[in-house]
Image (tube, rainbow, N blue to C red):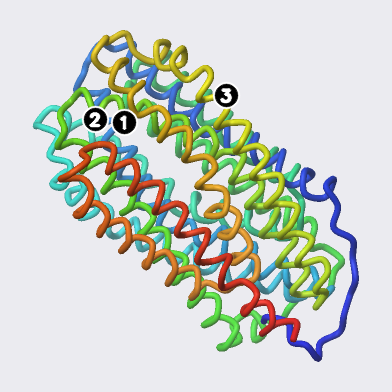
């Protein structure tokens, strides 16, 4: 539960070291994910079959949508656990974890039961062609077995981050992706099982990480007072977890919709512009790794401050994560403006794509700065479990983006598209920031 002005105050100091102790390991953890994607693609690429590469790409998109939408299990757990840490409530930390694990298991079983319609709907929407469709079916059918383990891993990661244990979280993510990579190479390349092998590598990685993570946390609970099952299944607490997770899910789906609209609208300008936009989005994704790291730091420290009912720690966490976010985003923008042309040349040899990407490079460089508040405020609101406001501001920002697409793209073309994307990012952060003092008063008085 969110702290009230009458609850006990438990002061603690928020320092730059505390912020970086969480942000740096999580940035490194987030960086392991694209490495996994590169390895999987390289493994399948060795077979020289374009349909297999396409099937892997389409399957990855389907899972990205499914698991990004369900990532609320990680963020929702982090917020509730961090608040329990702030209150010094060890029993509630365990109760939150068990609620998240139960919800993860239920959703994982649901995904297994719905695997076929999810797979076929994804193929219908993507319409990749017969050969690619068959490869996608093979990949999705096998990899979906890992769904319950993936969702359990979200819950485990949520507990670790809520407790501020970023280094164990990094080690667990490294284990997950490391075994996944090794499994994909062994099954896919060495044994020659191709796309089936890559999917099996994912199952092996997710299952191993879930088992190790669960054992690690279970071991940490030993000797501590445990919650009763009546406490775990307490109706109001369980409904609050579900409600927060529902709001975060809607927010995540709206975020995916915004980026999908960007890609879909860019496609109308032809293959060259579409390719140029895809290359330029890499600059935003790079910034996103460390912005996500600082957002995670904000989640834990803000949640802890609210649980401790300690206003100075709350505002100090907001201030430090914002300052460091803007400093690093500003540095990224300068680097992209100075060296972006050379980086574009490395990513593509097509003259038309190079020229087009350079034309829109300043817009891509701006996304890092425009995205700072969007990432950081998401972290603040997740830590505070103010999910309804986060959901509403996301939907309002998406509506603004859609309006700008209709108004600007017909007149300014791809420039209008990039303006709409930057406005989407900026509106998310600014609306949440404007709402922050009012929300803080409801907690601290």
Residue at 65%, 37% (x, y): give it.
328
Question: 211 or 6, which lies in front?
Answer: 6
Image location of residue 277, percent across then percent down = 31, 31
Residue at 80%, 57% (x, y): give it.
220
Determine whether, in the image, residue 435 is placed left or right of residue 262: right
Which numbered circle lies on residue 277? 1
Which residue is situated farthest in the left direction here?
130
The answer to which of marks 1 and 3 sits earlier in the sequence is: 1
- Residue 427 visible here: yes
The answer to which of marks 2 and 3 sits earlier in the sequence is: 2
| Residues packed near mark 2 inside 10 Å, few (<14), some (14 to 19) or many (20 plus) | many
What residue is shown with label 3?
335
Question: 362 or 89, which lies in front?
Answer: 362
Q: The residue tagged with tag 1: helix, strand or loop?
A: helix
Image location of residue 82, percent across then percent down = 72, 66
Residue 97 falls in which quadrant of the image? Answer: bottom right
Viewer-nearest of labels 2 and 3?
A: 3
What residue is shown with label 2?
274
| Residues packed near mark 3 inside 10 Å, few (<14), some (14 to 19) or many (20 plus) | few
Which numbered circle lies on residue 410? none
Image quadrant where one finds the N terminus? bottom right
Mark pair 1, 3: CA separation? 18 Å
């Amino acid at each position: 539960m969110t702290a009230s002005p009458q609850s006990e105050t438990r002061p603690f100091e928020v320092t730059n070291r505390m912020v970086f102790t969480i942000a740096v390991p999580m940035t490194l953890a987030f960086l392991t994910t694209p490495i996994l994607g590169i390895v999987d693609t390289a493994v399948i690429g060795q077979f020289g079959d374009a349909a297999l590469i396409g099937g892997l790409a389409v399957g990855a998109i389907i899972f990205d949508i499914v698991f990004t939408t369900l990532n609320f299990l990680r963020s929702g757990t982090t917020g509730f656990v961090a608040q329990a840490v702030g209150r010094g409530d060890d029993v509630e930390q365990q109760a939150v974890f068990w609620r998240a694990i139960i919800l993860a298991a239920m959703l994982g079983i649901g995904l297994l039961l719905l695997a076929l319609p999810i797979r076929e709907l994804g193929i219908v929407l993507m319409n990749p062609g017969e050969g690619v469709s068959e490869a996608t079916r093979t990949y999705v059918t096998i990899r979906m077995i890992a769904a319950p383990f993936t969702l359990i891993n979200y819950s485990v990661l949520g507990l670790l981050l809520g407790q501020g244990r970023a280094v164990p979280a990094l080690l667990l993510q490294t284990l997950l992706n490391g075994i996944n990579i090794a499994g994909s190479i062994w099954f896919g390349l060495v044994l020659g099982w191709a796309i089936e092998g890559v999917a099996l590598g994912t199952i092996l990685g997710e299952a191993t990480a879930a088992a190790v993570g669960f054992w690690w946390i279970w071991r940490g609970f030993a000797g501590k007072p445990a919650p009763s099952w009546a406490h775990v299944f307490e109706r109001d607490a369980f409904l609050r977890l579900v409600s927060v997770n529902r709001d975060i899910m809607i927010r995540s789906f709206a975020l995916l919709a915004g980026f999908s609209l960007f890609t879909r609208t860019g496609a109308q300008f032809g293959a060259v512009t579409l390719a140029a936009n895809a290359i330029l989005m890499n600059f935003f994704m790079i910034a996103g790794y460390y912005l996500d790291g600082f957002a995670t730091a904000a989640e834990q420290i803000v949640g802890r401050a609210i649980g401790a009912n300690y206003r100075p720690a709350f505002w100090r966490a907001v201030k430090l994560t914002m300052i460091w976010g803007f400093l690093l985003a500003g540095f990224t923008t300068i680097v992209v403006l100075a060296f972006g042309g050379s980086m574009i040349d490395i990513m593509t040899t097509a003259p038309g794509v190079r020229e087009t990407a350079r034309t829109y490079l300043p817009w891509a460089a701006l996304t890092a700065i425009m995205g700072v508040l969007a990432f950081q405020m998401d972290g603040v609101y997740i830590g505070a479990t103010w999910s309804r406001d986060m959901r509403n501001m996301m939907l309002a920002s998406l509506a603004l983006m859609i309006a700008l697409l209709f108004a600007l793209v017909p007149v300014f073309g791809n420039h209008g598209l990039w303006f709409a994307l930057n406005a989407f990012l900026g509106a998310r952060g600014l609306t949440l920031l404007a709402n922050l003092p009012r929300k803080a008063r409801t907690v601290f008085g």
